[in-house]
Image (spheres, rainbow, N blue to C red):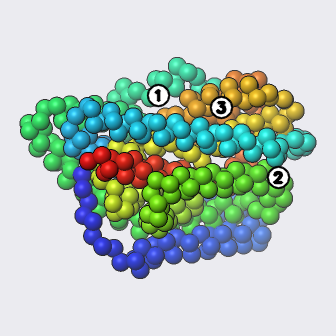
């Protein structure tokens, strides 16, 4: 798969980014106005209705993810040509992903221990019913279910549910089989290549709805949440989280600079629009097709992008990883449960494994946090402590996931170019 590297006028790029930022501000002002000047029922009704705009945009993107992952990954592997090349790139990718995940988890563990935002927290006002949805999903979370979740029993079921990791596994087998057949598979590979071009053209149409989707998402949240009261109540938790996520950004950008040098700034200019969309919609999946396009225009070979990004969306969610250790230990602090260093390291390793491959699960981070708490005898209902502020934390961790995958793909792409 290879999109044309046409020159895009900077004004067009800035135009989409500017529209999204304006949409965020307008959504925030409208939501705050509805919250302060409407009764509770009217605000809830408004929030439910306006969020439809965000739902429509995210669904439009989601309908492209499965066919885009399948077509680009199969074509990319077929172009790589052999198992050795796939293994080499896959090995580099997994080494990067697990290292980045470990660093992200350690950052969360470090800051929650240093700042101790959960110590002395008042638990009397916690709404335990709010955690019901998450704890219900946790009951079905087990090692067996986790392993079964990785491997597809039907590619059609996996595509219908947008299970990226399952689609990746099928696509790898399909691509390797196509590469081994050689010229006989060329008509199929060419057809998939052309299909990927069509899907990427659809991406440009869908992205025109991005400002509308972001507007609906932001307005819907602010209409039913008193941000000033939330930030006062959760000042210590949210402030500590922001320190943690900021330090993670610093480390990611520093590592990116070590490998990419000054091109890291060009990369940031390319991905600013996907970052803002992920921030506004709290969905890193919402920018998957757009991110694929921008990374190719940044100069990374299509076969690398098509192989790395789907893997990254399953194995390399840096922002979510940092949040998981932070939130799990925060809940233990709130309940006054001491965790020694050995226990925390065990928790870190558990999160390292159980967090992989569940990116498609709604509120996946919270489900993993709740499951981890259960494993270490921390009250699962403590998840209710972080639910009120979780949406705002999700904004930052979704954008961080996009940044981490962009840097990982760019660095591996640079390594491969140097070896050729």
Residue 165 at x, y percent in the picture: 42, 36
Say which of 384 and 307 sits in front.
307
Q: Quadrant of residue 40?
A: bottom right
Residue 31 at x, y percent in the picture: 68, 68
Which numbered disc, 1 or 3, marks the residue that appears first in the sequence? 1
Residues at marks 1 and 3 touching, judged by CB atoms closer than 8 Å = no
Task: Tell me if 110 is positioned left or right of 400 in this view.
Answer: right
Residue at the spot 62% in from the left edge and 56% down from the top edge: 250
Say which of 172 and 285 sits in front.
172
For label 3, the residue is 348
Q: Nearer the viewer, mark 2 or mark 1?
A: 2
Q: Secondary structure at mark 1?
A: helix
| Separation (CA) of disc 2 from disc 3 | 23 Å
Mark 2: few/some/many CA within 10 Å (<14, 14-19, 20+): some
Task: Tell me if 221 is positioned left or right of 264 in this view.
Answer: right
Q: Residue furthest top?
A: 144
Per the rendering, the mark at residue 236 is 2
Q: Quadrant of residue 16?
A: bottom left
Mark 1: few/some/many CA within 10 Å (<14, 14-19, 20+): some
Height in image: 42 above or below 303? Answer: below
Mark 3: few/some/many CA within 10 Å (<14, 14-19, 20+): many
| Separation (CA) of disc 2 from disc 1 | 36 Å
For label 1, the residue is 149
Q: Residue furthest bottom?
A: 11
């Amino acid at each position: 798969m290879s999109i044309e590297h046409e020159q895009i006028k900077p004004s067009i790029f800035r135009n989409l980014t500017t529209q999204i930022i304006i949409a965020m501000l307008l959504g925030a002002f409208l939501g705050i106005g509805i919250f302060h000047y409407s009764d509770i029922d009217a605000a809830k009704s408004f929030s439910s209705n306006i969020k439809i705009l965000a739902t429509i945009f995210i669904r439009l993107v989601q309908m492209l993810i499965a066919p885009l992952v399948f077509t680009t990954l199969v074509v990319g592997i077929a172009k790589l040509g052999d198992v050795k090349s796939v293994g080499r790139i896959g090995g580099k990718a997994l080494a990067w992903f697990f290292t980045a995940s470990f660093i992200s988890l350690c950052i969360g563990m470090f800051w929650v221990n240093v700042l101790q935002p959960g110590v002395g927290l008042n638990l009397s006002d916690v709404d335990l019913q709010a955690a019901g949805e998450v704890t219900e999903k946790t009951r079905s979370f087990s090692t067996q279910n986790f392993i079964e979740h990785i491997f597809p029993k039907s590619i059609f079921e996996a595509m219908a549910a947008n299970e990226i990791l399952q689609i990746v596994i099928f696509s790898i087998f399909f691509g390797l089989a196509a590469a081994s057949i050689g010229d006989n598979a060329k008509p199929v590979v060419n057809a998939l290549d052309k299909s990927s071009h069509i899907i990427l053209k659809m991406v440009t149409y869908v992205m025109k709805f991005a400002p509308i989707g972001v507007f609906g998402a932001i307005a819907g949240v602010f209409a039913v949440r008193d941000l000033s009261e939330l930030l006062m109540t959760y000042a210590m938790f949210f402030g500590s989280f922001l320190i943690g996520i900021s330090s993670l950004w610093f480390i990611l950008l520093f590592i990116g600079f070590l490998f990419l040098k000054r091109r890291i700034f060009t990369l940031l200019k390319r991905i600013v629009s996907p970052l803002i969309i992920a921030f506004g919609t709290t969905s890193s999946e919402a920018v998957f097709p757009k991110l694929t396009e921008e990374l190719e225009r940044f100069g990374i070979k299509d076969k690398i992008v098509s192989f790395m990004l789907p893997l990254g969306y399953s194995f390399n969610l840096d922002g979510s990883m940092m949040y998981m250790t932070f939130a799990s230990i925060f809940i233990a602090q709130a309940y006054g449960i001491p965790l020694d260093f050995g226990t925390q390291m065990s928790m870190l390793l558990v999160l390292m494994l159980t967090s992989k491959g569940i990116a498609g699960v709604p509120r996946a981070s919270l489900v993993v946090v709740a499951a981890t708490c259960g494993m270490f005898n921390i009250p699962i209902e403590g998840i209710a402590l972080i639910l009120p502020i979780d949406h705002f934390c999700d904004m930052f961790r979704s954008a961080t996931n996009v940044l981490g995958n962009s840097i990982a793909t760019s660095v591996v792409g640079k390594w491969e170019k140097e070896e050729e």
